[in-house]
Image (tube, helix red, strand yellow):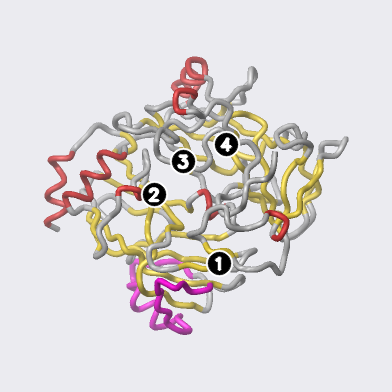
């Protein structure tokens, strides 16, 4: 509780907390870890979370409950305990794991948090959800939460190699009412051109994003479909794997359509270039979960400066991680697949996405995760 009481000195305006405020939280002890937090974990508007030393293979995913601690649930559901070493441990596809994270929180009473997979995690089709102790929801931590953090991990397509310190998820901190309403969003689109569409679809306080199947972004390639029964991927390696060993390129068709195979995983890109101004952050949410037999985008955070010309991001597309459900589904060029909501930052980050951070996806088009070797040309 001492850390939470120390936080009033860090009080800032309502909004998403920027990197400098996150660093101040860590210094004050509101974010703590046995292994000190590293500067590279802190992004313009989020904190990368690290896997801790202990993991468990569990029988199945489960809904957290305020009536039972994680220790009690693990005693009931764990199949075996796993020690995460520097050498790495393989997490198999189709299995569910629970990992205690290095970080724990002691949030002040007016600060809440939300989590998402990192972009590279989503592009590997690794399903993750952050869980707080006795918190009855996934990826959401209430204002004033104090306690440990756990990560549910379930590789869907590729087996992965992880170790203590691997970063699969990230957390964002919110104070007060941060989301732009419809009027404010329309004004921001007119002023900053959030998406490069003259007839941008704004409704319910969100701006629509559609899919590009024309092949114009990647020399005639509309997207990539993941291969099955591949080798494993070390999540901490960059540019280490041949694309052809894991992905099948999908040539654009004259019809500009794509039939999604049930339970297949695709990497596609948005038709619109996306722009997140420096004093805002964005998140992608499903267009409408009731009308489409597919899901899109595991990793929903867009940091301040994504697609911002001054940070080297002019023309950055949103990469879409698409999985069909039980039936084949026809996806058409220009079809709306998601909505972007924009939120105010409490203050501008000292460093923007892509600005000296080694950001992996600034100015991207159709792009696989950082683990794969760049395609020639």
Label 4 belongs to which residue? 339
Q: Are marks 3 and 2 in contact (CB under 8 Å)?
A: no
| Residue beneath disc 1 | 160
Of the residues under marks 1 and 2, which one precedes in the sequence? 2
Q: Which mark is in front, 3 or 4? A: 3
Do the residues bearing badges 1 and 4 touch, measured as CB atoms within 8 Å?
no
| Residue 258: quarter of image | top right
Spatial distance from mark 3 to mark 4, Cα to Cα? 23 Å
Q: Which residue sits at x=51%, y=60%? A: 235
Q: Is residue 28 above or below residue 346?
A: below
Q: In whole angstroms, how far apart are the C-alphas of marks 3 and 1?
A: 22 Å
Give the side of residue 261 with respect to residue 144, left or right.
Answer: right
Quadrant position of the N terminus in the picture: bottom left
Q: Position of residue 36 (x, y in %)?
A: 25, 58
In this rendering, the answer to whether 198 lies above or below 164 is above
Badge 2: residue crowd in 10 Å (few <14, some 14–19, many ≥20): some
Q: Looking at this rendering, what residue extends furthest in the front direction?
A: 377
N-terminal of the pair, mark 1 or mark 4, is 1
Judged from this view, the residue extending furthest toward the right is 254
Is residue 197 within the magenta segment?
no
Dot 3 or dot 2, earlier in sequence: 2
Which class describes the residues within 10 Å of circle 1: few (<14), some (14-19), or many (20+)?
A: many
Q: Earlier in the sequence, mark 3 or mark 4?
A: 4
**Residue 177 placement: quadrant:** top left
- Residue occupying the point 44% across, 55% down: 169
- List the residue tagged with mark 3: 359
Q: Secondary structure at mark 1?
A: strand
- Magenta residues? 62-90
Discs 3, 1 touching: Cβ within 8 Å: no
Tell me whether circle 4 and circle 2 mark residues in contact (CB < 8 Å). no
């Amino acid at each position: 509780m001492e850390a939470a009481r120390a936080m009033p000195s860090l009080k800032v305006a309502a909004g998403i907390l920027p990197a400098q405020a996150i660093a101040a939280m860590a210094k004050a002890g509101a974010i703590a870890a046995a292994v000190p937090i590293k500067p590279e974990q802190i992004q313009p508007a989020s904190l990368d979370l690290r896997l801790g030393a202990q993991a468990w293979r569990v029988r199945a995913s489960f809904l957290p409950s305020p009536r039972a601690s994680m220790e009690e649930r693990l005693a009931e559901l764990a199949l075996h305990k796993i020690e995460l070493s520097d050498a790495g441990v393989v997490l198999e596809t189709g299995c569910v794991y629970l990992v205690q994270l290095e970080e724990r929180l002691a949030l002040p009473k007016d600060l809440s948090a939300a989590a998402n997979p990192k972009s590279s995690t989503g592009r590997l089709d690794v399903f993750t959800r952050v869980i707080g102790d006795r918190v009855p929801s996934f990826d959401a931590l209430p204002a004033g939460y104090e306690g440990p953090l756990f990560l549910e991990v379930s590789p869907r397509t590729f087996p992965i190699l992880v170790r203590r310190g691997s970063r699969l998820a990230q957390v964002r901190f919110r104070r007060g009412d941060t989301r732009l309403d419809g009027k404010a969003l329309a004004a921001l689109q007119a002023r900053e051109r959030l998406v490069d569409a003259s007839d941008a679809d704004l409704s319910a306080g969100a701006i629509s994003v559609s899919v590009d199947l024309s092949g114009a972004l990647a020399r005639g390639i509309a997207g990539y479909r993941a291969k099955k029964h591949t080798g494993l991927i070390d999540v901490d390696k960059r540019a280490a794997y041949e694309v052809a060993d894991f992905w099948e390129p999908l040539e654009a068709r004259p019809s500009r359509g794509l039939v999604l195979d049930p339970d297949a995983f695709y990497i596609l890109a948005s038709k619109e270039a996306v722009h997140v101004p420096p004093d805002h952050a964005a998140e992608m949410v499903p267009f409408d979960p009731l009308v489409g037999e597919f899901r899109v985008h595991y990793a929903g955070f867009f940091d301040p400066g994504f697609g911002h010309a001054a940070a080297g991001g002019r023309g950055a597309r949103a990469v879409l991680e698409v999985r069909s459900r039980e039936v084949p589904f026809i996806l058409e060029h220009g079809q709306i697949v998601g909505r972007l909501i924009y939120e105010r930052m409490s203050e501008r980050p000292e460093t923007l996405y892509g600005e000296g951070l080694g950001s992996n996806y600034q100015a991207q088009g159709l792009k696989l995760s950082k683990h794969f070797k760049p395609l020639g040309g």
